Structures are given as C-alpha cells and as structure tokens.
Image (cartoon, rainbow, N blue to C red):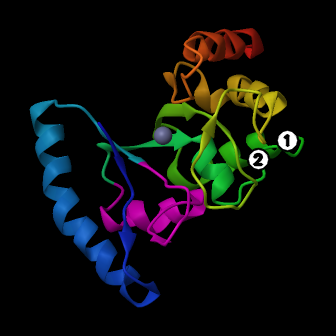
C-alpha cells in the first residue's frame, strides 16, 4: 500500500511532524506485519513545500522515525526524484540515485517503482508526468533504471498521460525494449 511521505507546515515543525509519523505509522506497521497484511510503501514526493521526504537521503530520518520497521518499504517515483533535484538525465545519474537510495534504505526496501518521465526541469519541484522518453528525463535514464540490480524483480508501474489512448501501452513497450 503506497502513501506519500507527507509534509510539515514549516522547517520549525519538521521534527514534530516526524514524531507524528512515528505515532501514526508504528502501530499500523506492527498491525500489518502481525496480520501478514500488505507492506506499507512510502513514496517520496516531488519536493514542494516542506516535504518530509523528497530527496532519497531524506528517507533516512523518515525510516529512523519508525525504528527502520521491516514492514515499511519504499516506492520510488522517477518524476518526483527528478523534481526534487536528482539529475537522472545525466549519464549515470539514475544509477547513482538508485545507488544512493539503496545506501540510505538498505537492499530490500525498494518494493515498487513509478516510472514516469517529466514535463519540467530537474529541481523544479513540479510533478507533471510525461510519457517515457518524451520528457526532460529521457530514455537513457530509463535504460539505467531497467538495468539497475535494485529494480530486478520489482514491479514497475507507469503513471503517464493517457490522452492519446496508446499512452500506457506505448510506455510499457518502451520500458520492455530498454530492459537489458
Ligand atoms: Zn507516483
């Protein structure tokens, strides 16, 4: 079950917000784990406002707030990471970002990928998805995504525009073609 990381009203309340995350999330994580229910996956946001987690390094304090609970996984959204300032379009950029994600959260926590290109520039904090290879992130970054060991066996979902009806089918075909 995917949820967004949430945000604080301002910088002065970030600590209090993480305490709220702990109070709300820990009992749910315990309950879901005990019942064999679905894992909860936190999805870092595009970085607007005082987001509690948009850059992948910010997942460290977030996970610490729930004592690195084993039932909390991560959903990585490429458009959000790009908007939050990870330069996925640079050669090796997607690989480096995923390396940094694994270093921050551990090897087994990435459980879902939202593969989306972006209509906006890196660091824009804007969350406008685009079809794979048609936006500012570009196809080579998605080839790196498909080749990264952290995404092996992990479901990948597209949340791309569908106005032209062929949107999702074309995007899925592109990702399959980029798969090594
Ligand atoms: Zn998403």
Residue closest to the eye, 46 or 95 = 46
Q: Is residue 74 magenta?
A: no
- In the image, what residue occupies the spot 76% across and 54% down? 121
- Taking the image as shown, residue 101 lies to the left or right of residue 157, namely right
Residue closest to the eye, 94 or 159 = 159
Stretch of the chain drawn in magenta = 43-68
- Taking the image as shown, residue 114 lies to the left or right of residue 1, namely right
Tell me which corner region of the image, top left, top right, bottom left or bottom right, holds residue 147.
top right
Quick one: which residue is furthest to the front in this view? 163
Q: Secondary structure at mark 2?
A: helix
- In the image, what residue occupies the spot 58% across and 56% down? 56
Q: Position of residue 108 (x, y in %)?
A: 48, 37
Q: Secondary structure at mark 1?
A: loop
Residue picked out by circle 2: 96
Quick one: which residue is furthest to the right in this view? 91
- Labelled disc at residue 92: 1
Quarter of the image containing the N terminus? top left
Q: Is residue 46 magenta?
A: yes
Q: What is the CA distance from the residue labelled 2 to the residue labelled 1?
A: 6 Å
Quarter of the image containing the C terminus? top right
Q: Position of residue 35 (x, y in %)?
A: 9, 33
Crowd tier of the residue under label 1, counting other residues whose Cα lies within 10 Å: few below 14, some 14–19, many 20 or above: few
Tell me which corner region of the image, top left, top right, bottom left or bottom right, holds residue 144.
top right
- In the image, what residue occupies the spot 32% across and 62% down? 67
Q: Tell me, yes or no, whether the two marked residues, 2 and 1, touch with CB atoms within 8 Å.
A: yes
Q: Position of residue 36 (x, y in %)?
A: 16, 30
């Amino acid at each position: 079950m995917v949820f967004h990381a949430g945000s604080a009203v301002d910088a002065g309340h970030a600590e209090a917000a993480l305490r709220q995350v702990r109070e709300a999330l820990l009992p749910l994580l315990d309950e879901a784990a005990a019942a064999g229910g679905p894992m909860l996956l936190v999805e870092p946001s595009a970085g607007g406002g005082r987001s509690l987690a948009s850059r992948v390094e910010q997942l460290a304090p977030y996970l610490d707030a729930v004592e690195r609970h084993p039932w909390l996984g991560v959903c990585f959204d490429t458009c959000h990471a790009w908007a939050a300032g990870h330069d996925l379009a640079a050669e090796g950029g997607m690989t480096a970002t995923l390396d940094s994600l694994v270093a921050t959260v551990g090897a087994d926590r990435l459980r879902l990928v939202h593969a989306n290109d972006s209509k906006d520039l890196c660091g824009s904090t804007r969350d406008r998805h685009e079809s794979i290879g048609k936006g500012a992130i570009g196809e080579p970054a998605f080839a790196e995504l498909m080749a990264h060991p952290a995404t092996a066996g992990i479901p990948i979902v597209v949340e791309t525009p569908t106005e032209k009806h062929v949107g999702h089918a074309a995007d899925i075909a592109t990702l399959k073609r980029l798969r090594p």
